[in-house]
Every structure is written in C-alpha cells, then in structure tokens.
Image (tube, helix red, strand yellow):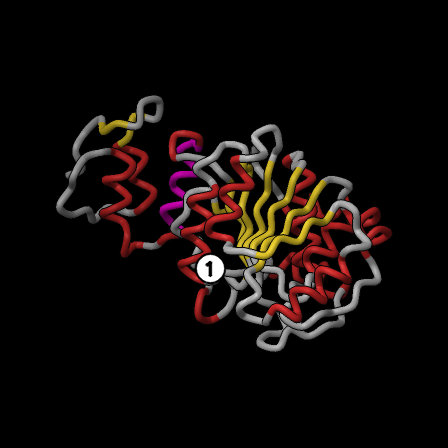
Amino acid sequence: MTINVIEEADRIFKTWKEKVLPCDYIENGIMLWEGLAFCAVCDKLGITLVLESGVAGGRSTEILARYFDFDIKAVDDGKLYGMDRFNNTKKRLSKYPNVEMINGDSDILVPDLIHANKDKKIAVLIDGPKGNRAKHLAKICMRDKTVKFVAIHDTCRDYSYHNLDDMIGTFFYTDDPKFLKKYKFIDSGKDIYSEDGGGLGFVRNIKWNDINMSQKIRFISRRGIKKLKQDIILITGYPHNSFSKPLVQIKRFIDISRGKVIRKPK
C-alpha cells in the first residue's frame, strides 16, 4: 500500500481541525502540521493504539487525544525535563479519558506495551530518545507485526537530517516542501531551533521482500552511491567487489520474482 501523506492530510483536515484546534504551542512539543501528518497516516493504516515515547509538555499527546477515540499510552522517564513537568503534564492531560501517562524507561516499557496489546494495530511516536537511540527503539518495536509504522521526531534537524533513509520502510518527512506550503499556516507557534519544526520521519513496518523492484531502486537511490556495494549484496546476495553501473541498471541483474542474480555485471 502506497501512502500519499498530503492526500491523506487533505482528506482528514476538516474533521481534524474541528477536533484539535485551537491548540496552543507548548515548548519542546511537535508542530501542529506534524501532528496532522501523524493522524493522517494513523487513519490510513487503521491504527487502534498509539504508543508515545517522550512526552515533555504533552502537546503531541493532546493532539492525538483530541482527534482519536482510541487509547494513547505515553511513556516518559521524567529525567530530561524533571518529574515536576511530567506530573504537571499528567495532571493537565487527565481530562482525556483515552490518555494514560506512564513514568519509566521507554526502551523497556514501549516493547512491553506492544507485547501486551497483540490485538491492536499499533503506531509508535518517538520524541525521545533521539538520534540513533530512537532508530534502535524503532527497530525493536517493528520486530512485532502489530506495529504498523513508527514516526520519529527531530529527523529534519541538522544533526539528524533525514537519518531514517537507511530504513527500508521510510516514506515521508514533514519538511516536504509541498506539505509545508499547504499546512504550515495552521501553527503560529515557533520551534526554538527551526521555524520548520524538528520534523517527523515516517517508517512503515515492512521487510525487503514486501516491496517491489521500483521501490527497491528508490530505496537505493535515497541512500546514495556510497552505500551501493552493500545494497547490491543486499538485493542479490552476490558479493561483488565493485560495481560501476548506474543505479537503474541494478534491475538488469535481478530476477524480479526470486530476487536472485541472473547474470553477472560486466
């Protein structure tokens, strides 16, 4: 299934706006257009439970609680911003019956919550930990088929710009120019680091054999030439020492139905 996030946002925007807005900006929170994109993907994939790692002031949690009727379980260890902020956020969000705030280590509790909700279609929103630790948590979560996708915040910052490109299921970032042009207006808040927000990166829980040849080629193109040799080994299982052909010619060396080399590159 291909997901066009802009089209999905268009489809839900009227209802989303009625349910969610107005929603004041909270420091360290996601931007409204990021929340819109997340809700749109959840709708498209029929999500029935959201697990959130990293809460801070709870803006993302509140956006989700207003839009969805199903449960939002939000985990935060209270170390970065302190337990006073965690407790104040928990108190503020207590008016939403579908929100459960949990104090603890996301690396432990989020996988436990996935295991305890095998009957759900789960989306995971990670806004802490950051960087490679966030990717590691995402990969652990996606070991379970009940997790349909993961979104990671701050993947459009300088220090982690589009760092999900090496994950097969990556399909969208909220710094997409067309998306921002259409929906940035809904939030007058200002992220303290960037006027375009930290950015959400979206990753489907799919495996290599789940995608077609054109998707494999796009994945390789996204990763770049420097990883080409590793990618050819991944696609073909053939341990080339070098490969100088253009990316699009990879298709010539693969049996599409079996994913095996049908002739060696010259």
Horizontal side of residue 27 vs 253, given as left or right: right
Q: Circle 1 sits on which residue?
A: 162
Viewer-nearest residue: 138 or 246: 138
SS at circle 1? loop
Q: Quadrant of the C terminus?
A: top left
The range drawn in magenta is 211-222
Q: Position of residue 232 (x, y in %)?
A: 25, 41
Q: Quadrant of the N terminus?
A: top right
Q: Position of residue 206 (x, y in %)?
A: 46, 36
Task: Please tell me which residue is depicted at 64% across the width and 58% down the height of the picture.
Answer: 178
Residue 176 appears anywhere in the view: no
Horizontal side of residue 149 vs 178, given as left or right: left
- Relative to 31, residue 121 above or below: above
- Residue type highlighted by circle 1: His
Q: Position of residue 254 (x, y in %)?
A: 28, 30
Task: Please tell me which residue is depicted at 76% across the width and 58% down the height of the picture.
Answer: 93
Q: Does the magenta segment cover residue 170?
A: no
Say few, some or many: other residues with alpha carbon within 10 Å of mark 1 (under 14 / 14 to 19 / 20 or more).
Answer: some
Q: Position of residue 165 (x, y in %)?
A: 42, 53
Residue 191 appears anywhere in the view: yes
